[in-house]
Image: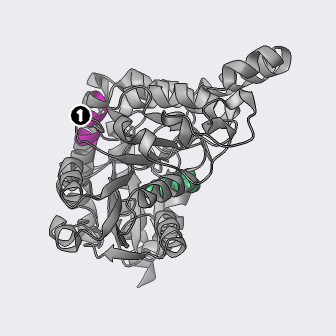
């Protein structure tokens, strides 16, 4: 579909959007990604971030030059790659210092390591708190940790569309709570929590906080140090553009590092890794949260994505993210509410990450039709559709075009289907 087919108020919106694209300070970054097939609009970056254009060349050079010809020498350079890329994520996207973040296994395993370390550090306390809009893998991991440690999990009920009410958290907190683990941005509703306030509430009862930043990192500004965050993990394959199965990072506040012990004690966490000593002796720094050889190829890909986020700068990412969100929301209200959609996200864009979730009773019939109209979005059964307007590679005109395609497809289904 081309813009010439847009009519009425949506054509006027497209005109304005073209002007905003022309002024967009992040517009050049779009060309740093491999283009989507012609005519396709990709608004599914909350499931998997797009491929940076330089990643494949960087991987090929890595494989051929470093792995292929420089083996032994390169091996020693790779030993601290998880720490170096961790420092880069910390600086560009987390508001954390160097020596507080390492990259290694998938998010689920990183969460497991830190959850166990946290409950071990609060012996005698019997409760882990999470919420029912936390990502399923997080809930499975926390249930397993609780069972292994004779603890119970309190799962706070959240509002499906607007997320956790902090009064519910306040009411659940007491001195029996060891750990509170929540997502900063809900994968479902996009609801964004107040990190500083949650940290304060949890610290008031002497418990630790473990954040999952998967839908937040690279999407919204994060200040781990300023908010006195204890622990965090986050995915590398959404808004950090590390590719499918990209390794995840973990963060441990510097002052806590030598007091926490993680359960998978491997040689990369040893104080004298290469001395090959018979007994485990954890390194005093963030290195102790590592286990084995870092996934060097995956980290090479992740470095490229993190570099793009650093180039953009999180303030510019947030400013454009809010502008895209406001445009999307206005168009949704005007063109999609009349064909049966409602918001399944907080109505204030400042209280969300970079995705907006819509509810429609026919979502599961609509999703394949929307895909066939060359618009990639996510469907969460039974009735949710998630549109992710990632600031690094989404144009204002893409937003207008996307809403128009959804409007057309939905109109056709409703006319033909009833
Ligand atoms: C994507 C995502 C994960 C991914 O977990 P992996 O173990 O890396 O596959 C975990 N938690 C949240 C909140 C996510 O959005």
Q: Is residue 346 magenta?
A: no
Outermost right residue: 69
Determine the image quadrant of residue 360. Answer: bottom left
At horizontal 37% and vertical 79% (from top left) the residue drawn is 361
Q: Looking at the image, which residue is at 48% across and 24% down?
A: 307
Q: Position of residue 414 (x, y in %)?
A: 39, 76
Query: Quick check: 244 above or below 119?
Result: above
Identify the colour scheme used: one colour
Part of the protein shown in magenta = 316-324
Quadrant in the rendering for residue 53: top right
Total marks shown come to 1
Q: In this orientation, does residue 370 appear?
A: yes
In this view, the residue in front, 418 or 239, is 239
Report if residue 34 is visible in the image.
no
User: Percent position (x, y) of residue 219?
Assistant: 36, 41
Q: Main secondary structure of the magenta part?
A: helix
Q: Which residue is mark 1?
A: 319
Q: Please check the rendered image and state whether residue 323 is part of the magenta-colored stretch, yes or no.
A: yes
Left/right placement of residue 85 relative to residue 29 reads right
């Amino acid at each position: 579909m081309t813009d010439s087919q847009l009519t009425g108020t949506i054509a006027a919106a497209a005109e304005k959007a073209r002007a905003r694209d022309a002024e967009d300070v992040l517009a050049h970054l779009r060309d740093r990604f491999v283009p989507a097939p012609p005519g396709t609009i990709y608004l599914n970056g909350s499931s998997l971030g797009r491929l940076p254009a330089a990643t494949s060349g960087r991987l090929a050079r890595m494989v051929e030059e470093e792995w292929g010809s420089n083996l032994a020498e390169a091996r020693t350079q790779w030993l601290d790659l998880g720490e170096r890329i961790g420092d880069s994520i910390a600086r560009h996207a987390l508001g954390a210092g160097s020596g507080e973040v390492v990259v290694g296994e998938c998010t689920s395993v990183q969460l497991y390591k830190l959850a166990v370390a946290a409950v071990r550090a609060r012996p005698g306390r019997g409760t882990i708190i999470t919420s029912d809009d936390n990502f399923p893998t997080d809930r499975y991991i926390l249930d397993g940790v609780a069972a292994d440690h004779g603890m119970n999990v309190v799962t706070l009920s959240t509002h499906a569309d607007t997320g956790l009410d902090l009064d519910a958290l306040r009411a659940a907190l007491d001195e029996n709570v060891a750990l509170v683990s929540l997502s900063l941005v809900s994968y479902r509703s996009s609801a964004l929590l107040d990190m500083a306030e949650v940290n304060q509430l949890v610290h008031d009862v002497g418990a630790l906080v473990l954040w999952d930043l998967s839908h937040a990192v690279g999407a919204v500004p994060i200040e781990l140090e300023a908010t006195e965050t204890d622990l965090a993990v986050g995915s590398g394959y959404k808004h950090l553009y590390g590719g499918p199965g990209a390794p995840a990072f973990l963060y441990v506040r510097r002052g806590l590092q030598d007091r926490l012990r993680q359960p998978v004690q491997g040689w990369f966490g040893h104080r004298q890794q290469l001395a090959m000593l018979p007994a485990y002796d954890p390194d005093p720094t963030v290195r102790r949260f590592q286990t084995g050889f870092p996934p060097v190829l995956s980290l090479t890909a992740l470095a490229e994505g993190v570099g793009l986020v650093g180039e953009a700068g999180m303030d510019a990412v947030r400013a454009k993210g809010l502008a895209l969100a406001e445009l999307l929301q206005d168009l949704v209200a005007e063109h999609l509410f009349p064909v049966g959609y409602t918001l399944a996200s907080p109505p204030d864009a400042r209280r969300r990450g970079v995705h907006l979730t819509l509810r429609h009773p026919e979502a599961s019939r609509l999703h394949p039709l929307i895909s066939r109209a060359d618009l990639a979005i996510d469907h969460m059964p039974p009735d949710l559709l998630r549109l992710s307007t990632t600031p690094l590679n989404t144009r204002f005109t893409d937003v207008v075009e996307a809403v128009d395609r959804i409007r057309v497809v939905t109109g056709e289904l409703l006319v033909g289907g009833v």
